Image: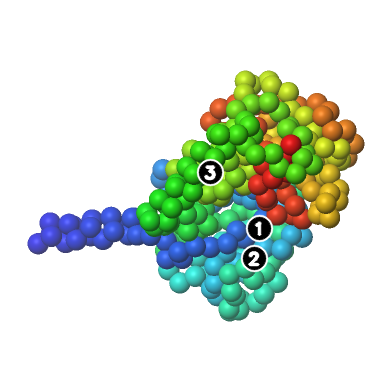
C-alpha cells in the first residue's frame, strides 16, 4: 500500500514538473534587455538567481506580464515588491513601487508600478528583478514570453521555413546583400550574410524567435563602420547583445532612422559622438549571445525594427 502511495506521489510530482505554464504567453514587464538570466539553485536554500533581470531606468513603468490580481504591494526586507497572481502562477516584480492597490485586477500590459534602483549587479541605473512562482517552486519567467514561439505549431513552422528558403534562393541569385535597398545606408562591414530579418530557429535557444536584423559574419577584428552620418545614442554592454551600439541618423525619408550594432569586440566611440558615414566605429566580435564572430545589424524606422536590406545600398 505504501509503495502505491509513493508511486502516485512520484507521478504527481513528475506531472507537476513538466506541466506547461498556466499562462500561455505573456508580455515583457519592462522593455529593456535581459541582463541576467534565470539560474535556480540546485537546493532550495542554495545560492542562485531565482528570476531574470531586465535593464531599465528609475521611474520606468513596470507592467503586468499577464492578467491577474495584485496580491501583494509593499516592502520585503526593505525592498519594494509587487506580486501579481495569475491563478496557478504568480509574478514577483522588484524593486518596484506599486501604482495600484492590493486586490486590483490588472490586464496584461497594464502598469502596476514604477522601477526603483537598487537591484545589483546592474549595468544601467536600475534593473527589474522578475520572478515567477508556481506554488513554492520557481520557474524561468522567460517561459511566459517565449511560450508563443515554443508552441508554434509544426504546420506554421514549416511555412516559415518554406518562406525563408524561397527568400534565400531569391537572394542567392543576386548580390551578396541581396537586391539593393533604397541605398540610404552603406554596408556597416564586409562579411557573409547569415541570418536574415524575420522568424528563425534561434541558434542558442532552439526556439522560433523574431530575428530583428541581419547577421554579417567575418573574422573577429573586422572593422565596423557607421552606415550613415550619425550621433551615437548608446554604447554599452549587456548579456544578450554583448557590446551594443545604437546610432541615430535623424530624419531620413521622413522617418526617424537608427541603426543597431551587436556582439562587437568593442567600440571606439561613445554616446554623444558625431560620426561621418563610413567612419570606423569598432571591430567585429562574438560578445553576448553569439555563436561566432559576426555583426548583428539592425535598422529601426520610427522606433520599429525593419529589414535592413531595404535600406542598404
Ligand atoms: Zn535579479
Ligand atoms: Zn543577429
Picture coordinates of residue 87, whole percent (x, y): 45, 72
Label 3, residues with CA under 10 Å away: few <14, some 14-19, many ≥20: few
Nearer the camera: disc 1 or disc 3? 3
Label 2, residues with CA under 10 Å away: few <14, some 14-19, many ≥20: many
Image point 60% across, 28% down: which residue? Answer: 192
Farthest residue, direction front: 173
Nearer the camera: disc 3 or disc 2? 3
Picture coordinates of residue 56, whole percent (x, y): 71, 52
Picture coordinates of residue 70, whole percent (x, y): 58, 73
Secondary element type, mark 3: helix
Image quarter of the C terminus: top right
Q: Which mark is residue 63?
A: 2
Label 1, residues with CA under 10 Å away: few <14, some 14-19, many ≥20: many
Of callouts 2 and 1, which one flags the residue occurring earlier in the amino acid sequence? 1
Image point 50% across, 54% down: which residue? Answer: 146
In the picture shown, does residue 304 fall above or below 193? below
Of callouts 3 and 2, which one flags the residue occurring earlier in the amino acid sequence? 2
- The answer to whether any part of residue 111 appears in the image is yes
Q: Quadrant of residue 221?
A: top right
Q: Is residue 190 left or right of residue 228?
A: left
Q: Which mark is residue 67?
A: none
| Disc 2 to disc 1: CB gap under 8 Å | yes
Q: Is residue 173 left or right of residue 96?
A: left
Picture coordinates of residue 284, whole percent (x, y): 67, 26
Image point 17% across, 57% down: which residue? Answer: 7
Q: Quadrant of residue 206?
A: top left
Image point 84% across, 55% down: which residue? Answer: 254
Check disc 1 and report the residue beneath it. 30
Amino acid at each position: 500500500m505504501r509503495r502505491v502511495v509513493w508511486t502516485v506521489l512520484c507521478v504527481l510530482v513528475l506531472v507537476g514538473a513538466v506541466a506547461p505554464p498556466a499562462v500561455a504567453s505573456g508580455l515583457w514587464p519592462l522593455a529593456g534587455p535581459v541582463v541576467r538570466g534565470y539560474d535556480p539553485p540546485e537546493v532550495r536554500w542554495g545560492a542562485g538567481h531565482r528570476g531574470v533581470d531586465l535593464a531599465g531606468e528609475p521611474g520606468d513603468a513596470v507592467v503586468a506580464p499577464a492578467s491577474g490580481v495584485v496580491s501583494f504591494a509593499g516592502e520585503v526586507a526593505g525592498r519594494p515588491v509587487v506580486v501579481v497572481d495569475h491563478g496557478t502562477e504568480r509574478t514577483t516584480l522588484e524593486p518596484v513601487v506599486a501604482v495600484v492597490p492590493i486586490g486590483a485586477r490588472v490586464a496584461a500590459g497594464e502598469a502596476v508600478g514604477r522601477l526603483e534602483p537598487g537591484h545589483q549587479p546592474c549595468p544601467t541605473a536600475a534593473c527589474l528583478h522578475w520572478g515567477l512562482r508556481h506554488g513554492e517552486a520557481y520557474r524561468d519567467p522567460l517561459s511566459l514570453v517565449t511560450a508563443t514561439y515554443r508552441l508554434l505549431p509544426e504546420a506554421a513552422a514549416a511555412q516559415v521555413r518554406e518562406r525563408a528558403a524561397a527568400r534565400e534562393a531569391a537572394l542567392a541569385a543576386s548580390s551578396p546583400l541581396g537586391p539593393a535597398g533604397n541605398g540610404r545606408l552603406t554596408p556597416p562591414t564586409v562579411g557573409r550574410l547569415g541570418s536574415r530579418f524575420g522568424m528563425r530557429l534561434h541558434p542558442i535557444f532552439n526556439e522560433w524567435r523574431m530575428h530583428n536584423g541581419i547577421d554579417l559574419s567575418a573574422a573577429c577584428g573586422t572593422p565596423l563602420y557607421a552606415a550613415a552620418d550619425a550621433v551615437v545614442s548608446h554604447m554599452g554592454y549587456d548579456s544578450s547583445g554583448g557590446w551594443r551600439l545604437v546610432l541615430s541618423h535623424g530624419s531620413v525619408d521622413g522617418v526617424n532612422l537608427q541603426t543597431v550594432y551587436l556582439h562587437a569586440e568593442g567600440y571606439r566611440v561613445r554616446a554623444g559622438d558625431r560620426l561621418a558615414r563610413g567612419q570606423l566605429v569598432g571591430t567585429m566580435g562574438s560578445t553576448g549571445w553569439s555563436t561566432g564572430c559576426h555583426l548583428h545589424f539592425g535598422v529601426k524606422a520610427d522606433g520599429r525594427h525593419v529589414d535592413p536590406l531595404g535600406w542598404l545600398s
